[in-house]
Image (cartoon, grey):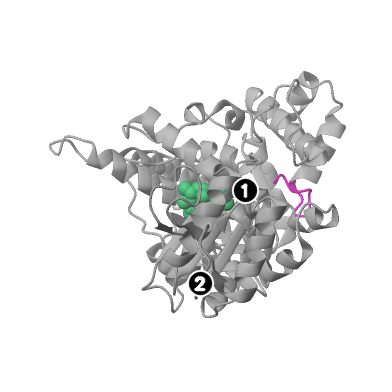
Amino acid sequence: MALRHILFVEDEAPLRTAVAEQLADRGFHVEQAASGEEAVDRLSSFAFDIVITDLRLGAGPDGSAVLDEARALYPDIIGIVVTGYGTVKDAVEAIKRGATDFIQKPFQLDELLHVIDVALEQRRLRTENAYLRKQLEERYRFEGIIGKSAAMKELFALLETVAQTSSTILITGETGTGKELAAHAIHHNSPRRAQRFVAIHCGAIPETLLEAELFGHVRGAFTGAVATRAGRFEEANRGTLFLDEVGTMTPALQMKLLRVIQGREVQRLGDTGVIKVDVRIIAATNHDLAKMVAEGAFREDLYYRLAVIPVHMPPLRDRKDDVPLLTQHFLAKYGSALARDRDPGLPPPQVGIAQEALRHLMSHAWPGNVRELENAIERAVAFTGGHRPIEVRDLPPAIQAAGASIAPLDMTIPEQGFDLPGYIDRLEREVIARALERTGGNKGAAAKLLNLKRTTLVEKLKRMGRAEAPRAS
Ligand SMILES: Nc1ncnc2c1ncn2[C@@H]1O[C@H](COP(=O)(O)OP(=O)(O)OP(=O)(O)O)[C@@H](O)[C@H]1O
Ligand SMILES: [Mg+2]
């Protein structure tokens, strides 16, 4: 059986540490949270299998709020509520809101273990039989952009505001962070939405052609110009022009673009007259344009014209709490694609993901950002064919090696760096948990197995169990 990860939320410290220790002895990986706030924080960075929470938690969010948060992030998580005397009504209420089971204080460890066993069995049956039922909630999306992290909520608010203006926008961000998606979202929320959204990928077109593409040309303007053609600026008139990969433009073209932006008129190649245009420009780049300006590779005046409103798309590794939601989104997307390709006589495919696989997704550094995640899910769904939930083995090798398991020593350090203390911390937790699993929770035997003194192991377990222990993000 895979190692089970439990988050134990309880504000009474002695009870919390005692139960956590007993559960750890039984081979569970337990982390503790002393308040609702702490619990919510832990949940945002780690995909637990089970959350056990006291209903009353002093100040801050209470147990039901913790459960709501847990279920919003992980629809398949097991929620167990601990209640005091005379609060069965609250427990029933919690069950109605999605808790799997409840247990009353004071309880014996065996009672709790029984509740956990039953819940795990229920979940196994549920993930085997069920397919996605949970629709993504409106508030976690802006147009096609999904996210619930603080960074993304902030971004949605910014996009909504800037959509109302006609200002030029510069969208920056690493590859796959959703720059093009954001450009669409802005256009579709702007007063220009009824007009055209015209996109041009500046990096993909040779310079000579790019100029003609942007500004148009008259017949005979250059070899091959067999007819007069309007440019993209004209096509986008009264609408939005999306200049993707604007950092790749040559200095000559940068200069022409600047003139058009300032003069609001274009001249077709080979023509003498000018044409007035009313175009909202959204530019995007994954280059560091400010640095290019400093190095003289990009015109400073154009940079300021473009970056009237800068919008930055945060990398996925900085908002890991978006991973479960994005995963659900892509599961739904590729699950229904599977359904469409299928014989209508067959039962609808089930698309789900094992919590352990989700943990790997959350540990991965995602150099390719959301696009990489989307590709990973698409691939995994194809492997399962919708016959079973996605397991770790269905994920691309780089992701299988991430986080929850031990990465091979010949790993290469990713471009954006590597969190060594976090890695060592995870490694230690994982190895200790496996040793305890092997010895059925016997600490003495586990210590021997790991060449540690028993007291050292006990110390480490205490430290790992402490709520303020280093994050295994
Ligand atoms: N927040 C998000 N929610 C849902 N899908 C997303 C999100 N971000 C990106 N995607 C998806 O990821 C893929 C890449 O997004 P997009 O093309 O907008 O990235 P980009 O920043 O323009 O990348 P590049 O710099 O490589 O062009 C697309 O399929 C897009 O739909
Ligand atoms: Mg792009």
Asked whether residue 472 is drawn in magenta, I would say: yes
Specify whether residue 143 is in view.
no
Which of these two is toward me, 317 or 38? 317
Residue corresponding to mark 1:
46
- Secondary structure of the residue carrying tag 1 is loop
Amino acid on which the number 2 mark rests in the picture = Val
Name the side, left or right, on which 76 lies relative to 319: left
Residue range of the region highlighted in magenta in the rendering: 465-473
Residue 192 or residue 416, whichever sits in front:
192
Residue 305, image quadrant:
bottom right
Looking at the magenta stretch, what is its main secondary structure? loop
Residue assigned mark 2: 279
Q: Give the x, y percent position of residue 285.
A: 64, 54
Residue 128: % across, % down = 34, 37
Instruction: Quadrant for residue 406, please give it.
Output: top right
Residue shown at the point (61%, 75%) measured from the top left = 263
